[in-house]
Image (spheres, helix red, strand yellow):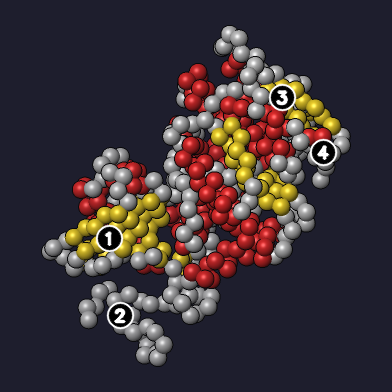
Amino acid sequence: MENSNNSTNTTNTAAATTTTKKKSKLCEICNVSRPVLKRPKTGEMICKECFYTVFEDEIHHTIVSNNLFKRGDRVAIGASGGKDSTVLAEIMTLLNKKYDYGLDLFLLSIDEGITGYRDDSLETVKRNQEQYQIPLKILSYKELYNWTMDDIVKEIGLKGNCTFCGVFRRQALDRGAVMLKANKIVTGHNADDIAETVLMNLLRGDIPRLQRCVNIITGSEGALPRSKPFKYTYQKEIVMYAYFKKLDYFSTECIYAPNAYRGHARDFLKDLEAVRPSIIIDIIHSAENFHFREENKMPVQRNCIQCGYICSNDICMACDLLKNLNSGLAKVKLSINLKRGKDSNNNNNNNNNNNNSNNNNNTLKLESTSVTN
Amino acid sequence: MKVKIELSGGLELLFDKKKVHEIEFADKNEIPLKDLILYMRDNLLKERSELFVVDDTVRPGILVLINDADWELFGGISYNVEDKDTIIFISTLHGG
């Protein structure tokens, strides 16, 4: 047998390791199977089954210790067909069953209207719906705002388009969740995403965002609370979980993304991770312990005078952005009617779906009821 | 020696959209992983090599699996690839 660089002496234990070319260690948790992963968080080398267990248990622990849900919650899972949301749908379904959370789960997908990117990933979400037997709702920017991202980029170019998309998507998720009569939203943001956001906000000096970005539950009075069960879950482990469990997801970069500022933070973070894998979770823990001076006033939450959505100014960002977009066009009128009801779950809102498909005269009617928790 | 390479997470787009590649080296029975990826860059990659190889190693953000296990278990880029190994490259650098 060839001897490569193996200079250590191996003892003659009966079980496994002898002088083979590869040092065969066993899983550090169960000591039975061969390891398939080295955990970035801890450096532990563990086998497939133990990996599933620690992965799932940690997320369960995150959910429970942060009181993310209670029995009877109707939870909309933000689903894009990508790696995070596919694993999120799998995990939520699995944990809901295994630990009897008692949740009603829904898949909510937003179609930004980006040709060649979103159309394909939506196919994946439809497959997810069948696999997990969860109801699916797809909502498009076109039907909500009468603009697709392709249109927006044609209009304003490649600078600032991500801002539009982010603002529109957040609102779209809320609107979609309300249509599903959900009272909570979950998204697949993972530890890498959050660490990137911390870096990004630091680099740009965005204090208000820096304060909010490590909260596991976000959303204020009146807006649906949205939480991130994957807050402490490494992207690498999400991908490995999907790989080993053969979960089918769609993976392409948004065609407009290469210009996004986040790319700088991401590259930096990846380089850091190569040197010290625990850095991702370290950044999150640091950010959780930031102290901010009192002078940083948090804006007062009000309601947009145009559509009623929660915001800190007279009109919300989406309406503001739309106003700018629409002023470039001659005769498109966008009016959003809002019916704000104090009564939550009366059955007068079955007509929501009918209203939303009525786009003939370019007016958009949305029924929205305030949801009590 | 023969090596099987699999690409996913969008990486295949850089390699002529082919997800599976079989490489044969007639004159070797093992090859350092670093040399293998440089070989891939120089012979199989069709465009944008910086999306695959950076500083003589795999671009950070691309996961590498050797025979279905994390390459970190085998010393990462310093692993010596052997006959009949399967190396899988999964990019994580895209939306989730």
In front: label 2 or label 1: 1
In front: label 3 or label 2: 3
Residue A310: % across, % down: 75, 31
In front: label 1 or label 3: 3
**Circle 2 residue:** A20
Name the chain under label 4.
Answer: A
Secondary structure at badge 2 equals loop
Secondary structure at badge 3 equals strand
> Could you tell me the amino acid type at mark 4?
Asn
Q: Residue at x 81, y 45 (%)?
A: A373
Tell me if mark 4 has few (under 14), some (14-19) or many (20+) residues whose alpha carbon lies within 10 angstroms of its own.
Answer: few
Mark earlier in primary sequence (4, 3): 4
Secondary structure at badge 1 equals strand
> Could you tell me the amino acid type at mark 1?
Lys
Name the chain under label 3.
Answer: A
Cα distance in 3D space between marks 3 and 2: 70 Å
Q: Which mark is residue B4?
A: 1
Between residues A316 and A151, which one lies in front from this camera angle? A151
Q: Is residue A4 left or right of residue A184?
A: left
Name the chain under label 1.
Answer: B
Name the chain under label 2.
Answer: A
Secondary structure at badge 4 equals helix
Same chain, marks 4 and 2? Answer: yes
**Circle 3 residue:** A365
